[in-house]
Image (cartoon, helix red, strand yellow):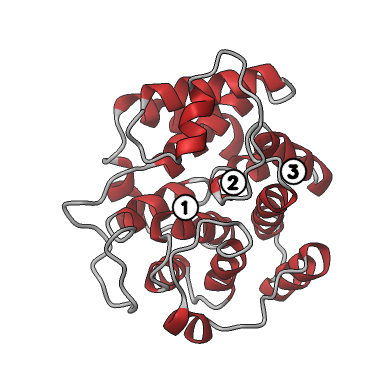
Amino acid sequence: MKGIIGTISGDVIGSSREFRPIKRKDFGLFNEYSTFTDDTVMTLAIASWLVKDKSSLDVLISEVKKFGLKYPNAGYGGMFRRWLNQDSPESYGSWANGSAMRVSPCAWVAGSLDEAQQLAEMSAVITHDHPEGIKGALATCDAVYLARTGASKEEIKEHVESNYHYDLSRSVDDIRPDYKFDVSCKGSVPESIICFLEARDFEDTIRNAVSLGGDADTQAAIAGGIASAYWDVPSEISERTLERLDNNLLEVYLQFVEKYEK
């Protein structure tokens, strides 16, 4: 199974390690603390927007607000929580990785790289209109789109490096020893992409991302979203992920799959 399930699985697997960081790859994928967080909620808010009307900024804002308010304890940052509670919310210049964590559905809807970039920028600017926030969403979406349409890892690496000037030359082993929790796009998106580039398969991607000991759920969601456009997500992982969604989120996920991933 390919698709946005990779983003959701990464979030659920990484959720138990967000505040209990580890620096190794040999961990159980699921445990009693494994749950969906804001990464999944916002990814499915974007998915719902794309199902309803991908051309409408008003629908986008409405869906993000609706999902955010329905799941108020999903783990949002303070500025985003304030945004959710405004009648006419305005972007607040965020450079954080929330723009990248939620963008993967845009790559599955787009019929071209240009369209993927347009949708990705729309999905970001309602909150993350700082250049680094937009850049993180674009780089992530491009990687997912290219993986989905048959590009090689080297082609994806070269595209991201040349267009977004991220340093993807490091290895996971280089990054891990001194890496710390970092919610910025600049300090977490390149590392997440490297976790995919260095991996053998989907599961190895997620293990790489969590083992950095950083923003585990978000980095696993970003890396997982790219990996699940390149490889299939094993059925055991997808099934154990989806059983952790409530009926509302599961319904939105299935609607998106039916419209865009089949």
Residue 20 at least partly seen: yes
Marks 3 and 1 sit apart, C-alpha to C-alpha, by 18 Å
Task: Please give the name of the residue rendered at 49% of the width and 28% of the height, measured from the top-left corner.
Answer: 82
Q: Which residue is mark 1?
A: 6
Q: Quadrant of residue 91?
A: top right
- Residue beneath the point at 16% across and 52% down: 32
Tag 1: amino acid: Gly
Q: Which mark is residue 116?
A: 3
**Mark 1 and mark 2 residues within 8 Å of each other at the beta carbon:** yes
Cα–Cα gap, marks 1 and 2: 9 Å
Q: Which residue does the image show at 74% across and 43% down from the upper left? A: 116
Quadrant into which the C terminus falls? top right
Q: Are marks 2 and 3 in contact (CB under 8 Å)?
A: no
Numbered disc 1: secondary structure:
helix
Picture coordinates of residue 258, whole percent (x, y): 52, 31
Which of the two discs, 1 and 2, labels the residue nearer the N terminus? Answer: 1
N-term mark: 3 or 1: 1
| Residue 232, visible in the rendered structure | no
Occupied quadrant, residue 209? bottom left
Residue receiving disc 2: 104
> Is 147 left or right of 16, judged from the image as shown?
right
Asked which secondary structure carries label 2, the reply is helix
